[in-house]
Image (spheres, rainbow, N blue to C red):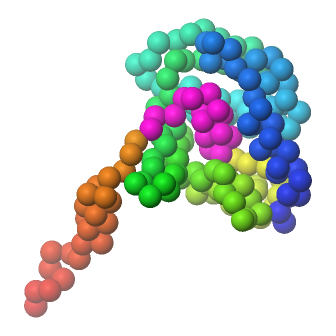
């Protein structure tokens, strides 16, 4: 049961229009717009993913409803990987695994996709949510400029693929 495409486009527009100040805090108006679309639990989980950075200077806290959220200067929780031919995907460090997130998908009913089980269940199967915390964290990190960017070279791709699909040592010995 997929959610309404109109509602998904509205969520995309709201996220794309979020404002932040010079310290990379979301403005109060931006936080209110997020609250209008998403449950507090999802917003806090996404911000928590972005804020799980080690060895980075803290800028302070931001009030989010009844809670405060720590805001840091750089994010290592979301990594943007791009190939020489322009393919872009994001890796999000979750609490138990790293998930691959795709945003800005065109020609599909969904504008984003995540490899986590929560996306499959709450977004695709039941339609109870517009996106998972990994997608929201990625969208916010991109909007706030908090992604670590890495260019993937052809040599790296070739090495990765050859290592991944290398036959076992004893595959050809009898």
Q: Does the magenta stretch include residue 144?
A: yes
Res 61 quadrant in image:
top right
Task: Tell me: 95 left or right of 173.
Answer: right
Q: Which residue is drawn at 23% across and 76% down?
A: 167
Q: Position of residue 82 (x, y in %)?
A: 45, 50
Q: How many labels does the image show?
A: 0
In the rendered view, would you say 157 is above or below 26?
A: below
Res 17 quadrant in image:
top right
**Can you say which quadrant of the picture contains the N terminus?**
bottom right
Q: Which residue is drawn at 74% across and 23% down?
A: 19
Q: Judge whether residue 49 can be spotted in this image.
A: yes
Task: Tell me: 31 left or right of 78.
Answer: right
Q: Judge whether residue 93 can be spotted in this image.
A: no
Q: Residue at x 50, y 46 (%)?
A: 91
Query: Which is more toward the observer, 56 or 159?
Result: 159
Task: Tell me: 152 left or right of 132.
Answer: left
Res 62 quadrant in image:
top right
Provide the residue span drawn in magenta. 133-149
Q: Residue at x 76, y 55 (%)?
A: 122
């Amino acid at each position: 049961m997929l959610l309404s495409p109109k509602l998904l486009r509205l969520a995309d527009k709201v996220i794309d229009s979020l404002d932040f100040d010079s310290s990379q805090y979301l403005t109060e108006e931006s936080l209110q717009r997020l609250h209008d679309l998403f449950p507090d639990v999802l917003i806090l989980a996404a911000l928590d993913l972005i804020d799980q950075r080690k060895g980075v200077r803290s800028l302070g806290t931001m009030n989010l409803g009844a809670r405060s959220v720590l805001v840091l200067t750089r994010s290592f929780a979301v990594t943007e990987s791009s190939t020489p031919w322009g393919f872009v995907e994001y890796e999000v460090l979750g609490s138990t695994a790293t998930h691959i997130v795709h945003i800005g998908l065109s020609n599909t009913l969904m504008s984003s996709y995540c490899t986590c089980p929560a996306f499959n269940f709450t977004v695709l199967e039941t339609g109870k949510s517009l996106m998972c915390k990994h997608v929201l964290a990625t969208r916010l990190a991109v909007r706030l400029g908090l992604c670590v960017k890495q260019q993937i070279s052809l040599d790296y791709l070739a090495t990765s693929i050859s290592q991944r699909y290398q036959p076992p040592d004893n595959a050809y010995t009898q």
